[in-house]
Amino acid sequence: MFTDADKNFMKMALDEAAKGLGYTNPNPMVGAVLVKNGEIIAKGYHHACGMPHAERDALANLRPSDSAENSTLYVTLEPCCHYGKTPPCTEAIIDAKISRVVCAMKDPNPKVAGKGIEILRDNGIKVEVGLLEEDAKALNVCFITKQLCKRPFVALKMAQTLDGKTASFSKKSKWITGEESRNHGHFLRHKYMGILTGINTVISDDPMLNCRFNEELCDEKSEIRDKKSEMCDEKSEFLNIRKEKNKTYLSNPIRIILDSKLSIPLDSKVAKTACDIKTIVVTSEKALDTKNNQDKIKNLKELNVIVMSAPLNKDNRLYLPKVLEILAQPPYEIDSILVEGGASVHDSFLREQLADCVHIYIAPKLLGGKDALTSVSGIGFDDPNTCPQIKILKTDNFDKDIYIEGKIEYLEP
C-alpha cells in the first residue's frame, strides 16, 4: 500500500519527467526522485535521447555529502536493464545500494518489460510498481503507442470557425484563429517528433512547417517548463535547437510530406530548407521507379530531402498503415506525428482509424458557404452514432478562441 508521501514524491518525479517534453523522442520522458529519511536528496530526469537516463541523472545530482545508500528511488518508468546509447540503470541502482524502488509503470519496451524489476529484486532491492500509473501512461502515450502498435502516435490539428470552416469559398484562411492559438499550435510542433501534411498543402500554401513558438504569448508556463538545449550528437540531425542570448529555441519537428506522384516543387520552402530541418517525402513505389522522376529524386537528395517509398492502397493513395510502420522503424524511429492536413489527409487517417487524438482551435466566426473548406473532407461518415467520437480531455481559451484536446474513439471495427 502506497502512502500519501509516496504519492507526493511520485508526483514530483512526474514533474521532473515532463521537463523532457519534446527533447527525449523517441525515448520516453522519465523523472526520478531520491528520498532518504523522508527528505529529498536528489532529483533528475532524462534530458534528451543519448543523454543519461533519469536514474543516473538523479544520482549525478547528489551532493558530495549525501549518499544514496538505503534510500528510496521514485521513478516514473521501470529502470532499463540493457545497453543502448547509455548503460543499464539497474547497474547504477545496485551500485548505489538503493534499498527501495517505486516505479509508476512497467516499461513496454520488449528489451525491458519486467526484466529490470526482476534484476533489482534478485539483488535484494524492494520494488513496488503501479503508483500513479495512469498519469505515467498519459505522459508517455507516444512512446507506449510506438512500442505496442509499432507505429507513431498520431495527432490531428485543426483550426476552424464555429461552423467548421478552415478557409472561405475563395480559399482565404489568414487568419481563422488568433495569435495565441497559432502560437500554441507551434508548441505542439515542438511536442511531437514529426509533422505531416499532404502535397496539396505544400503546393497551395508553401508552408515552412517549423516551430516558431513564442513563450511570452503562452500562459501555460507549467506545461512549457525550462527547456534544455544540450543535445547529443546522435540527436542533432533530428532536432534543431540552439541557444542565443540565454534564450532556448524549441525543437523543429521532422517534416513528412505525403506525395504519391512526387510532385513536390524543388523551390518549395520545405525542400529548400531540408539542410536545416530534417525532411522526408513519402512517395509511391511506382513514382520512385518512373524514369522521368530520376533527375528529380537526384535533385531532392542534393537538397538533403529524404525520399521514402510506400505502397498505394486500392484508391491509389499512399497506404497509411505501411507509411507509419516504416516511419516508426530505423533509421527514422519516429514516435509521434502531428498531422496538419489538409482535409483529405485528415479524412484518410480517420478512415484508417490511425488518428489517436485531435487538437482543435475554434474561432468564434461563421464563414458559411458550400464551397468553403472544412477540416475533414471526403464522402464523410454516414451515421452520427457510429462515426469517430471525441472524448474531451482538455479545454481552454486562447484569447477569443476555444481549444479542445480530445482522444479519438472508433466505434466501428
Image (cartoon, rainbow, N blue to C red):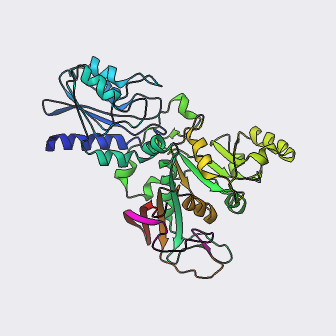
Left or right of 156 on screen, residue 278: right
Residue 391 belongs to magenta span: yes
Left or right of 206 on screen, residue 348: left
Count the numbered circles shown: 0
Q: Is residue 253 visible?
A: yes
Residue 218 position within the rendered picture, expressed as x and y whole percent measured from the top left: 42, 57
Is 194 in front, or is 356? 356
The residue at the point 49 percent across, 33 percent down is 231
Left or right of 63 on screen, residue 306: right
Is 227 in front, or is 87? 87
Residue 207 position within the rendered picture, expressed as x and y whole percent measured from the top left: 65, 57
Q: Quadrant of the N terminus?
A: top left
Residue 326 position within the rendered picture, expressed as x and y whole percent measured from the top left: 61, 41
The residue at the point 37 percent across, 28 percent down is 80
The residue at the point 25 percent across, 44 percent down is 11
Residue 223 to residue 127: above or below: below
Q: Is residue 246 visible?
A: no
The residue at the point 36 percent across, 44 percent down is 18
Outermost residue, front side? 413
Magenta-colored span: 373-392
Residue 164 belongs to magenta span: no
Outermost residue, top side? 95
Q: Main secondary structure of the magenta part?
A: loop
Residue 177 position within the rendered picture, expressed as x and y whole percent measured from the top left: 52, 69
Is 267 in front, or is 145? 145
